């Protein structure tokens, strides 16, 4: 009886662990969501989308690094704002700056 309970407990533990891992989103998926959110506000061509997707993947990989301190993450956020703004034209920058909540979502 003890062995059956132990086997059931182990199987349950593996099931819970597998489900928790399946729910994690990858940096690529998170970047695609960010780009879709940005594209809903501003018009972008495919080249710009590809460039910004690369930037967002890098951002998500950096921000998920547990070794970085909060100061390092804040500095990285500032760099991503600069890189994002340098890729946009004046009209796109104006639209993005008019929505600070969106900007915060994109760089944090």
Image: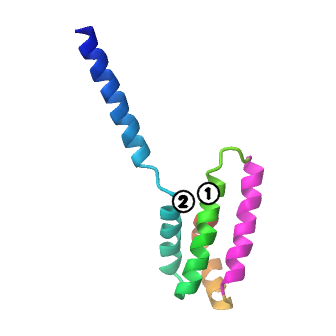
Q: Dividing the picture into quarters, in which one does residue 51 lie?
A: bottom right
Segment tinted magenta in the rendering = 69-88
Q: Which mark is residue 61?
A: 1
Mark 1 crowd level (few <14, some 14–19, many ≥20, 10 Å Cα): some
Q: Dividing the picture into quarters, in which one does residue 95 lie?
A: bottom right
> How many numbered marks are there?
2
Q: Secondary structure at mark 1?
A: helix
In the rendered image of this protein, does residue 33 appear above or below residue 95? above
Whether residue 68 appears in this view of the structure is yes
Of the numbered discs 1 and 2, the one sitting upstream in the chain is 2
x 66%, y 84%: residue: 88
Mark 2 crowd level (few <14, some 14–19, many ≥20, 10 Å Cα): many
Q: What distance separates the C-alpha of mark 1 from that of mark 2?
A: 6 Å
Q: Which residue is mark 2?
A: 27
x 60%, y 75%: residue: 52
In the rendered image of this protein, does residue 84 appear above or below residue 68? below
The answer to whether 38 appears left or right of 80 in the picture is: left
Inspect the magenta stretch and tell me whether residue 50 lies in it.
Answer: no
x 74%, y 46%: residue: 69
Q: Main secondary structure of the magenta part?
A: helix
x 24%, y 15%: residue: 4
Q: Can you say which quadrant of the picture contains the C terminus? A: bottom right
**Residue 30 placed where, x, y %?**
51, 62
- What is the residue that sits farthest to the top in this orientation? 1
Q: Secondary structure at mark 2?
A: helix
**Residue 98 placed where, x, y %?**
62, 79
Q: Cβ–Cβ below 8 Å for labels 1 and 2?
A: yes
The answer to whether 42 appears left or right of 108 in the picture is: left
């Amino acid at each position: 009886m003890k062995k059956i309970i132990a086997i059931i407990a182990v199987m349950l533990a593996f099931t819970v662990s597998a489900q928790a891992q399946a729910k994690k989103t990858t940096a690529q998926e998170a970047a695609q969501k960010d780009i879709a959110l940005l594209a809903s506000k501003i018009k972008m061509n495919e080249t710009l989308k590809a460039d910004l997707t690369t930037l967002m993947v890098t951002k998500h990989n950096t921000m998920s690094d547990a070794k970085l301190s909060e100061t390092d993450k804040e500095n990285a956020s500032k760099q991503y704002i600069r890189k994002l703004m340098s890729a946009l034209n004046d009209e796109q920058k104006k639209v993005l700056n008019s929505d600070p909540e969106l900007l915060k979502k994109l760089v944090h």
